[in-house]
Amino acid sequence: MTSDSHNSLHRTPVLDVQDLRTYFHTRSGLVKAVDGVSFSVARGETLGIVGESGSGKSITALSIMRLLPQPAGRIAGGRVILAGEDLLTKSEAEMRSIRGSRVSMILQDPMTSLDPLFTIGDQVAEPIRAHGRASGKGILDRAIEMLRLVKIPSPEARMNSYPHEISGGMRQRIVSAMAIACEPQLLIADEPTTSLDVTIQAQLISLLKELQERLGLAMIIITHDFSVVSRICHRVAVMYAGRIVESTDVQTLFRNPQHPYTVALLKSLPQLGADIQRLQTIGGQPPDLRNLPNGCSFAPRCTHATERCHQQYPAEVMVAEGHVVSCHMLETSSAIK
Amino acid sequence: MMASNTLDSAIGMRSPDELAPAPLIRVLNLQKHYHLADGVLGAGGKGLVKAVDGVSFNIRKGQTVSLVGESGCGKTTTAKNVLLVERATGGTITFAGQDVSTFDRLELRRFRRSVQAVFQDPFSSLNPRMKVLDIIAEPIDVHQPLSSMERKSRVAELMAKVGLGLAAGDSYPHEFSGGQRQRIAIARAMALQPELIVLDEPVSSLDVSVRAQVTNLLRDLQEETGQSYLLIAHDLAMVHYMSDIICVMYLGKIVEMASSQELYLRPQHPYTQALFAAALPYDPSQPIDNIVLGGEIPSPLNPPSGCHFHPRCPHAMPRCKEDPPQLQELASGHHVACHLHGNL
């Protein structure tokens, strides 16, 4: 929950993403889905990437995994450094041995990430077998151990069940078991709780936290849900139209957000307990990536926008230790902060 | 079966001596049981899903009543019954004092004009081959055809009301974003000046930054027209903000019902408490009430005995396994079905 204990662990990042650019070539033109994104995640740390649909958060994750839709998606630049090695220079064969073993991923819908024709046991055993983490009877033993780790009741019996026989919450646990079966350094979870009921979401969040502590995972949680962020993340990067507009520790994000988009977004959410007469709204619509405005992408919806915002994209400003914001408004005042 | 006079006090009558008008919709002991055809277990007996099992609530003019709960709790089935898309297998629904099961063709037509719906996904609820103008005008064309001049001006009026530019009329749904499509769906629902609009997760498919726009729009329109809402949603913060009365459902039954503020301040049922705990405060420096419910939502095909919630309840007592608790009034307008409260 606190950021202090994590800042000290910091700076031997497991993952270091530098100036990542992912473009899509579509019939209606070039779409810069991710346009110069940089962040890092340390061991035992959870980074939240928050944003709306089209902000580029999922494409960022798929770029790290090198799983972009082909041939439209192309990584146009940047570096994705996992424990000292740039993943963008790896061959497809090398990537295959990295995915599921050193980096793994949990997707939103557990029904589509499990194969309906194979048993739970087959599927949890698959990464263990494929990456040679055990052999013979050892594979099944390890699979059962994984199911126990994600708190599946009577794991031996569950090994023979098929995905359709279990609930959504349990399926997401199975997917989590597959993801951690080879003890990855980095776990990326893309909207892991979105398809689950509220009380089941709470269960999965506490499971992910426990797994992280136990295995020392570096985690990236991609979500649009600020209550998930507040519960599980240490640091947060807010994305808008393919770029990170603000990044800071989770406490600061909620207490002292600086970018007008973050501020407006947090104010527009109904909060339990607060007696709000009326929700504040953000005018306009999320931008069309094929037709981004010049200058700051948020400027057309921003109540503080000036002439300059419409012409030039703002540089990153460090407003406090570990708190970086891209906004012209803060450029002048940065010296004081 | 619940005495209806205790129910009335739950619903909107803030002071008992106040003479409240008859509710617009009165749902009394609604049941919707589905028989599973050709099940291995045979008809009747265990092959029976009690999707809605004895649900009662009222909706008054200008009120927003919400049904909240997790998947399988029966909230959508209840709404479908209120819309008369599904026909109840037990209990009664009255609309403006008349039992809906006695409606003749004309009365049913009148009902369909007065009760409209807005669904979750505006990508599938709008016909992609129709122009926005025709989508919004369709209920008018069906129920009270207007001359083309009048039709045009009525649609323009509706579009202005929901904040769509006039030019939008000649476009097709795919040209709009989710938030704007939901505005189109709301304009269509309002075309016949209905008395009740059923809102089934109206903002949950929208981008976070446009949810507040649509939520505020719904509230403004209600203030202007006095229409009632039956809201189905799972986001408690949103429900709390929108509703007058909240009904919390679990496996086909209402387990707690109270005014929005009362329910938030004094949730009594352990399930309601867990739902509120899961809908966290956003400020991570606030202490998190860490009630993580164990277990899964049981299958409605084979619900637990007694109180359906007892296998997951942190306070379950032996009695909860056998004796299903009845909904009873704890404080004025606050109803709970739990053995921890009262002594029925």
Image: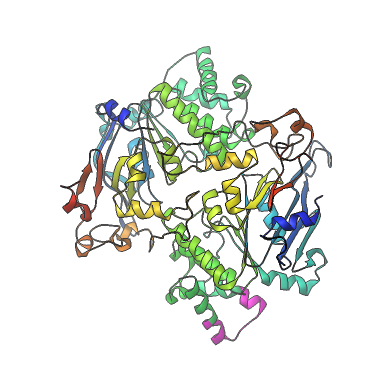
> Where B175 sits versus A265, above or below?
below
- State left or right for residue A282 relative to residue A32: right
Near-viewer residue (B117 or A305): A305
Magenta stretch holds residue B148:
yes
> Where B308 sits versus B200, above or below?
above
> Where B95 sits versus B52, above or below?
below
Magenta stretch holds residue B70:
no
Near-viewer residue (B261 or A166): B261
Quarter of the picture containing the N terminus of chain A is top left
Q: In which quarter of the image is residue A305?
A: bottom left
Residue A38: x, y in percent?
26, 40
Residue B75: x, y in percent?
66, 51
Q: Which residue is drawn at 52% across and 50% down?
A: B237
Q: Which residue is drawn at 33% across and 48% down?
A: A239
Residue A69 in sight in this render? no
- State left or right for residue B31 relative to residue B164: right
Residue A168: x, y in percent?
58, 37
Q: Magenta segment, which residues?
A: B139-153
Residue A330: x, y in percent?
21, 52
Q: Which residue is drawn at 81% across and 71% down?
A: B104
- State left or right for residue B182 relative to residue B324: left
Number of labels in the image equals 0
> Where A16 sits versus B23, above or below?
above
Query: Coloring scheme of the render?
Result: rainbow
Residue A277 in sight in this render? yes
Near-viewer residue (A306 or A313): A306
Near-viewer residue (A247 or A4): A4
Q: Quadrant of residue B50?
A: top right
- State left or right for residue B315 relative to residue B41: left
Q: Which residue is drawn at 60% across and 48% down?
A: B263
Determine the main secondary structure of the stretch shown in magenta: helix
